[in-house]
Amino acid sequence: MTTFLLSVGSPDLIGSAARGAVITAFFVFIGLCLLWVFTLATQDDDPERLYVAGRSLPPVFNGVAMAGEQITVVILVSLPGAIALFGYDGVSTAVDSALALGVFLLLASRIRATRRYTLGELFALRAEGPGTRIAGAVVTLCIAVPLLMVQLRAGGITAALLIGMPTGTAQVVCTVLMGFLITCFAGVADLRGTSFIQVAKVPIALATLAALALLALRLFDWSPESLLSTAMDKSMSPDDYLSPGLWAHTADFGPLGTISDHIVVILGTAMMPHLLLRVSASRDVSAARRSLSVAVGLTGLFYLLLIMAGVAAAAVVGSGQIGVVDVKGQGAPILLASEVLPHHATGRVVVIVLVACAAFLAVLTAVASVTFAAAVSVARDLFGQRGRSRIGIGELAVTRLSVVALCAVSLLLATALYRYPIEFLLAFSLSLAATCVFPALVYSFLWTGFNRRGLLWLVYGGLSICTLLTLASPAVSGTKYALLPEQDFNLIPLHTPGLISVPAAFLLGWLGSARPWEGAARTRRTALREARSQ
């Protein structure tokens, strides 16, 4: 959910008096983080130790890191604003995101038991061969690149907001600088090193959101009821704040559009490729279950605090002021941090710095995790042992080069499209994960008749359906928030295609594997032979 966080002429959210201290503290934090990152870099030549930490991460440690995987900069920056502006619809999205790990829990034990950790390897459970592995790599890349674009851009725009330079040029420069720093991190990181950063991020993010919520409650004499009623009064539509429909894209197709969004957010968030590496790092199946139990608890707490911060932003700042900065509300966390304490207070600088540090860690870890998972898939699934032998490069070298290439391509695309709202790319990535990954894994684990033909039909058919439906949706044309608002070629009034694409993928997988027409043809031939014999 990323669009322009600032526009030319946006107000200075921090103030000149505090800006110097905020920028200094922020850059010191960045320097310390990068120094720590490079100390965690490994020189191990064992791919399994690099990719899944030798399957040795303790359950609680891995569970906290798994919770950290859910704390991305887009979630941290966008959802409080969505809740502040759109009330019930924003809360609904937060709840869906929190439920995603519960869905992943249903398949995590089976995934860990296979000892496989890329989509291509999991797809090959019922259908061995290079074609299935390539299909896994294609899906992984199609999910990863849009996600990387959104995360890099959100990080750069947040940095531009913090330094008080709301121009498009400043946004691009900050995006490039942030992208360069994160590429350096991703290029040397492995799963173990990333895990330490994830574990550090979780308490920082939770403490930041808790501080914002408590400081806001203090302004209302510690009365949640007073806070909520003020949020409703200062919202864009007080009577509808706690009812569905304020968010523009939820009103086009009524309940069916809402159901489609629920399907995409829950299944898509649960089926991200980087979660496969994370659960595979557990010592065994029981450890994977314990890790997920820890992750579910921490993720639930995170989203609860996120909802509280969103309501607090509506009450303290007001939807009108939040909407001035950005129509999607992505300035809400920093606006809230700058308003919960008096402008002359030292604590105000501390709170703003906490928000900035949490956002930087979120973008750092999110980009690194997604990039690393995609690079592992490229090295193991796309090239394979034969492909690497032809080009004369080892597996780890292919992985590192893939990391740099993916970051560079994503950064180039993010900066080239900085004038356009690319929020639909996040929904597209989630739709692909929900459509191509979830049905394929369900069939692979639960249906012995699932075969190579069914897998390829499901994956490539689902990819095609998602692409076509997204291009024909209001997310791309015909609406105020579309990629091309001046054009109007949307044919499907669904913001996300999950309501159609997920059942279609299941159907394609069944048709390709069962081929019922062949059975019908055999029945007709048998009946014809019997008729002739009589």
Image (cartoon, helix red, strand yellow):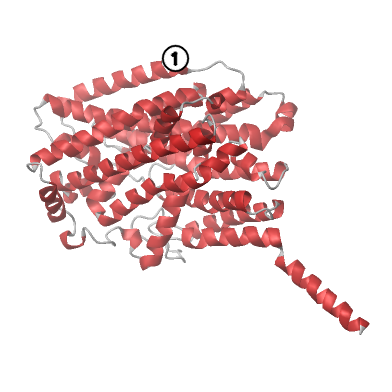
Residue 404 coordinates in the image, percent (x, y): 53, 28
Q: In the drawing, does residue 114 fall left or right of residue 263? A: right
Q: In the drawing, does residue 191 fall left or right of residue 161? A: right
Residue 341 coordinates in the image, percent (x, y): 11, 33
- Of the pair 63 and 215, the residue shown nearer to us: 63
- Of the pair 513 and 37, the residue shown nearer to us: 513
Is any atom of residue 180 visible in this view?
no
Q: Which residue is pictured at 71% across the width and 63% down the height?
A: 515
Farthest residue, direction front: 286
Classify 10 Å Cα crowding around label 1: few (below 14), some (14-19), many (20 and above): few
Q: Which corner quadrant of the image does residue 223 belong to?
A: top left
Q: Is residue 231 above or below residue 194?
A: below
Q: Which corner quadrant of the image does residue 10 belong to?
A: top left
Q: Is residue 200 above or below residue 514?
A: above
- What residue is pinned by disc 1? 39
Q: In the drawing, does residue 508 fall left or right of residue 210? A: right
Farthest residue, direction right: 533
- SS at mark 1? helix
Q: Amino acid at mark 1?
A: Thr
Residue 244 coordinates in the image, percent (x, y): 28, 61
Is any atom of residue 319 visible in this view?
yes
Residue 32 coordinates in the image, percent (x, y): 34, 17
Q: Give the quadrant of the C terminus.
A: bottom right
Q: How many marks?
A: 1
- Of the pair 374 and 441, the residue shown nearer to us: 441
Q: Which residue is pictured at 40% across the width and 17% down the height?
A: 36
Q: In the drawing, does residue 208 fall left or right of residue 300? A: left
